Image (cartoon, rainbow, N blue to C red):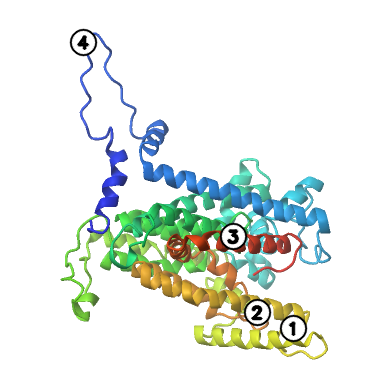
């Protein structure tokens, strides 16, 4: 255990140690012996939870942000449809009809949750990948199987498919918020660059949870999308790695790899934490000799490789098993990669993707300033040139906001957090779309929880900016929900 987190660990384990590992107190003469609840029962787990102030604070803050943010999502989505209707392109983008047909009330309540890519998840959960159908179903391979399997499992219990998706996404988001709270408290309780100026780690954790719950693109965390499931698995992997539970790291990494292609990126932070820390399970084998240690000593791993490192080999297993399944089912094992071409993506490199996004946004600004549709500045775009211009400018705005955030993560948090966020962001930047180079980048950035942890710490040190920042973020989320519910493209 490092000195930075020793104090926090003592505080957190006080409640866990209460009533554990102690001999039973002898009962007074004439009284029945004291019966202790077995540790494995639900009652014992709840008792340990209530006895731990840090865990209870995480539960309270996460629950409050969960229901407040989801209430805003449904009020914004349902209110927009009641006021303006479903929009003119409702039928054009819902050919399977899987997001409608639930009656007027069901269709209304499903609007903030089931749009666009939700169709694909619902169809896969219902009919599978149907590889025998040929190239017509190749686009489905881009959607990894764990989330559709979860939909099918919950639907098998009797829930309608859309409701199953909302339940799965919301429950996963609740777990993710709890984990973000705990990770923030753990990381910001240290000294040096991670120490908070004039604020407590618990306040930073509460603000990190709020920043994640009310992020502009947080509407996808309760929609029939895989964002919340991937977020929960990635947060769980970081927490397990920090605690030295490498078996769970391998399992959660494999599940994340079966949820999204970015799950493979999680191997990098897992290795960094294993070799360089910080770790709570044991002291470093090669501690640094102060801040003046040379760069060669800093590059040398602080922890020796032991047998438990083999669990890290499970992290890529989810994605590999998915490809193996596709091959055994008569399809192409590399279909998830080829499916990206169906969606207009082409592998280039982060620098090329950023340059294409800058050029598209610049042409989009010229298009909006001209106020006309006849002359198109960005000729690779599709549809209305004004709408295309707005999308490209919005995507660039999120990329610009990402830059100071990732710099803050690299400066404030352990290296593994920054490496993970940077590597995950480079994937969509390396695979741009010709018509909209940075397409879906805002949605791909929102599960990168290190950004929320940094923002929580940043806001905790600047109390005057808390309300304006969260109010602006929540207002943007409500705006995007209104667009999403009426079948307008959002990220």
- The vertical placement of 48 against 89, above or below, is above
Q: Name the residue under label 2.
A: 393
Visible in this render: residue 151? no
**Disc 1: CA contacts within 10 A as few (<14), some (14-19) or many (>=20):** some
Mark 3 to mark 1: distance in Å? 27 Å
Mark closest to the chain's N terminus, 3 or 2: 3
Mark 3 to mark 2: distance in Å? 20 Å
Q: From the viewer's perspective, is 343 left or right of 52?
A: right
Q: What element carries label 4?
A: loop
Q: Mark 4 points at which residue?
A: 29
- The vertical placement of 441 against 119, above or below, is below
Looking at the picture, how far across and down is residue 454, in whole percent?
Answer: 44, 65
Q: Which quarter of the rendering shows the C terminus? A: bottom right
Mark 4 to mark 3: distance in Å? 60 Å
Disc 2 + disc 1, Cβ < 8 Å: yes
Disc 1 + disc 4, Cβ < 8 Å: no
Looking at the picture, how far across and down is residue 57, in whole percent?
Answer: 43, 45
Q: Name the residue under label 1.
A: 368
- The residue shown at (74%, 52%) is 78
Tag in front: 1 or 4: 1
Mark 4 to mark 2: distance in Å? 78 Å
Give the number of marks. 4
Q: Mark 3 points at which residue?
A: 218
- The vertical placement of 32 against 405, above or below, is above
């Amino acid at each position: 255990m490092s000195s930075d987190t020793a104090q926090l660990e003592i505080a957190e384990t006080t409640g866990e140690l209460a009533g554990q590992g102690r001999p039973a107190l002898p009962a007074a003469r004439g009284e029945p012996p004291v019966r202790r609840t077995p540790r494995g029962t639900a009652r014992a787990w709840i008792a340990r939870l209530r006895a731990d102030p840090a865990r209870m604070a995480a539960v309270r803050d996460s629950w409050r942000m969960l229901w407040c943010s989801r209430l805003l999502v449904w009020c914004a989505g349902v209110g927009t449809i009641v006021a303006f209707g479903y929009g003119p392109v409702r039928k054009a983008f819902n050919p399977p009809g899987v997001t409608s047909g639930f009656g007027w009330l069901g269709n209304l309540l499903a609007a903030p949750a089931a749009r666009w890519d939700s169709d694909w998840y619902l169809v896969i959960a219902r009919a599978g990948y149907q590889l025998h159908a040929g190239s017509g179903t190749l686009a489905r391979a881009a959607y990894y199987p764990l989330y559709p399997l979860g939909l099918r499992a919950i639907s098998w219990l009797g829930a309608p498919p859309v409701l199953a998706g909302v339940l799965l996404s919301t429950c996963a988001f609740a777990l993710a918020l709890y984990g973000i709270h705990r990770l923030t408290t753990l990381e910001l309780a240290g000294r040096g660059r991670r120490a908070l100026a004039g604020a407590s780690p618990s306040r930073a954790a509460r603000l990190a949870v709020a920043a994640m719950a009310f992020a502009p693109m947080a509407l996808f965390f309760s929609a029939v999308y895989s964002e919340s499931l991937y977020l929960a698995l990635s947060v769980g992997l970081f927490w397990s790695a920090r605690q030295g539970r490498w078996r769970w790291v391998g399992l959660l990494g494999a599940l994340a790899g079966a949820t999204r292609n970015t799950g493979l990126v999680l191997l990098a932070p897992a290795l960094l934490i294993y070799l360089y820390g910080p770790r709570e399970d044991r002291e470093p084998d090669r501690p640094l000799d102060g801040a003046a240690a040379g760069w060669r000593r800093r590059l040398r791993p602080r922890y020796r490789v032991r047998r438990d490192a083999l669990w890290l080999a499970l992290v890529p297993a989810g994605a590999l098993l998915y490809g193996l399944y596709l091959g055994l089912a008569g399809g192409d094992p590399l279909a998830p990669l080829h499916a990206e071409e169906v969606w207009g993506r082409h592998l280039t490199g982060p620098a090329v993707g950023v340059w294409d996004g800058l050029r598209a946004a610049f042409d989009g600004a010229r298009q909006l300033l001209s106020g006309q549709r006849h002359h198109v500045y960005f000729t690779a775009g599709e549809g209305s040139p004004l709408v295309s211009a707005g999308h490209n400018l919005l995507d660039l705005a999120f990329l610009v906001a990402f830059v100071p955030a990732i710099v803050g993560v690299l400066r404030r948090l352990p290296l593994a957090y920054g490496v993970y966020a940077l590597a995950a962001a480079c994937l969509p930047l390396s695979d741009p779309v010709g018509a909209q180079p940075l397409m879906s980048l805002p949605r791909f950035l929102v599960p990168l929880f290190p950004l929320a942890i940094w923002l929580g710490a940043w806001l905790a040190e600047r109390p005057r900016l808390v309300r304006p920042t969260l109010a602006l973020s929540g207002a943007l989320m409500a705006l995007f929900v209104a667009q999403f519910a009426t079948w307008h493209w959002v990220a």
